[in-house]
Amino acid sequence: MNNIAHRLILGPIIGGLSHQSVNLWARADGEGTLHAFLGQQPDLSDAQPAGTSPLQAENGFAGVVPIRNLQPETTYYYALTLSPDLPQGERFPSFTTFPPPGEPRSFNFVFGSCFRPTTEHSGQAFRAIIRRLETDDLRFLLMIGDQIYADQWKYNGIGKVATTLEDYRAVYAHVWSNPPLRDLLSRLPAFMILDDHEVDDDWHWLDSERQWADIPILDKFIRWIEGRPPQERQLPPQRVRYALQAYWEHQGMHAPPMLHPPRLNRGGLYTLETKDTGSLAYTFTFGAAAFFVMDTRTMRVRGRGAQTMLGEEQWAALEEWLLNVKDTYPIKFLVTSSALLFTMFVDVARDRWSGYPRERDRLLHFLAANGIEGVYLLAGDLHSAHAVSAELYGPNQKAIPLWEFCASPFEQNPNWLSRFTYIPILSGAVHHQRKHFCVSAINYGLVRVDFSEPHAPRVRFEIHYLDERKGEWKMRAVG
């Protein structure tokens, strides 16, 4: 086998970045070996081999090279190839490692969700982010759901609802080959988590043993009217397994270590065992800011006698993490693919936290009872962007501010109703809820964390959105 005969069709992606490690990911069109090179000179004249990874059919020819023992706050240039020889005369991308955990450093990052390209010219949000990479010193990107739309056959590149492992892999290959997205991911470290469309629209389990899964009856009806075959109108566990295997290959493989990972077999394949309580949740830090990335999908159950969004193992991990970071990290970000503080009175599907009010209140009451301050929720999914603030009453009735920032979509149909249908959540845990703005347009969020005064850090949220009538980008901000 000659590695040079194949090529990288996706990637590179800078994943799992920390103060001392990184995961470099790519996918090829056939078997081979992924070679990573690392150096500190822009032309990689000082490059050293940094590791290899086999690319095999079992994992869709996707692989990751984990690199350890890096220096904090240091810029490294890198190359990923299918050849043991470093390419010459190229412009090499770079990344800068994070500060040591707990060290106060000001930083900026971007986030968003929901990318459904429609033409070869798609990716306007990613082009806009690329233009800000250096001027705003962006440190990383959070992609918090619907990185593909496997169920939307008119746009997913395969002309059908994805039902097999090869279908899901093909959708990733189509969507992630978008030039602006591919360029951005090679230059800006990324942290990802799934939402529903990586599997199917608004999907959930019907039982805690995960023997039965389902999608909304409206989706089934529309697909029946459209003449879609039966296998596209059903969601058997095998199809969920295929979707999660493709997720693992493209998003989970390069993520930071998961807190309680789901089981994989010896070949690295998703098993989806009924007694497996593992989730895709993980944490990371940037200096004195801590992030908990929730998995709101794979353990979600909505059926008779059972209703949960996170599952008990993830709940235990989340509550333990919140207590651990309470006094050691002044800024805490909870990343959730679904909005928690933003409710719409026409939300029939109740697919967000509003559909799981007991779990929503469990989180809010836990934050209040333990006096956990400096918490910011980062959400996606809504196809509109918003900033909502509220107060929790902590011990001795101390008012604790809580914010939710939402950025969505990178590219999808905007939700024009959201700004008119917002209502405060019905919960005794929160008070003085306020919607600061709601924007229905293609957008991305930019968060600025200012530690210039370490004991009084500030967080500013900017939503950058495209005014399609004028063809220009605009901005709204809070903080």
Image (spheres, grey):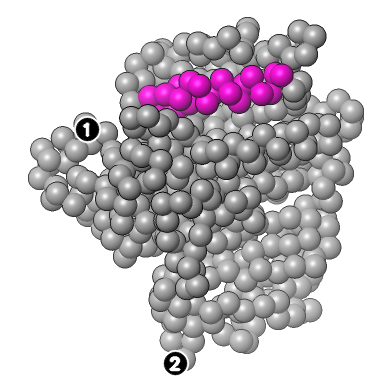
Disc 1 vs disc 2: which is toward the camera?
1
258 shown above or below 216:
below
Amino acid type of the residue that numbered disc 2 sits on in the rendered structure = Met
Residue at figure coordinates x 31%, y 65% from the top left = 166
| Disc with the residue nearer the chain's start (1 vs 2) | 2
460 shown above or below 75:
above
Q: According to the image, label 1 marks what residue?
A: 217
Q: How far apart are marks 1 and 2 (CA)?
A: 49 Å
Residue at figure coordinates x 70%, y 76% from the top left = 50
**Element at label 2:** loop
Q: Give the range drawn in magenta.
A: 350-369
Q: In this view, does 246 lie to the left or right of 294?
A: left
Residue 191 percent across, percent down from the top left: 60, 50
190 shown above or below 336:
below
**Element at label 1:** helix
Residue 287 percent across, percent down from the top left: 81, 44
Q: In this view, does 211 lie to the left or right of 125?
A: left
Q: Which mark is residue 94?
A: none
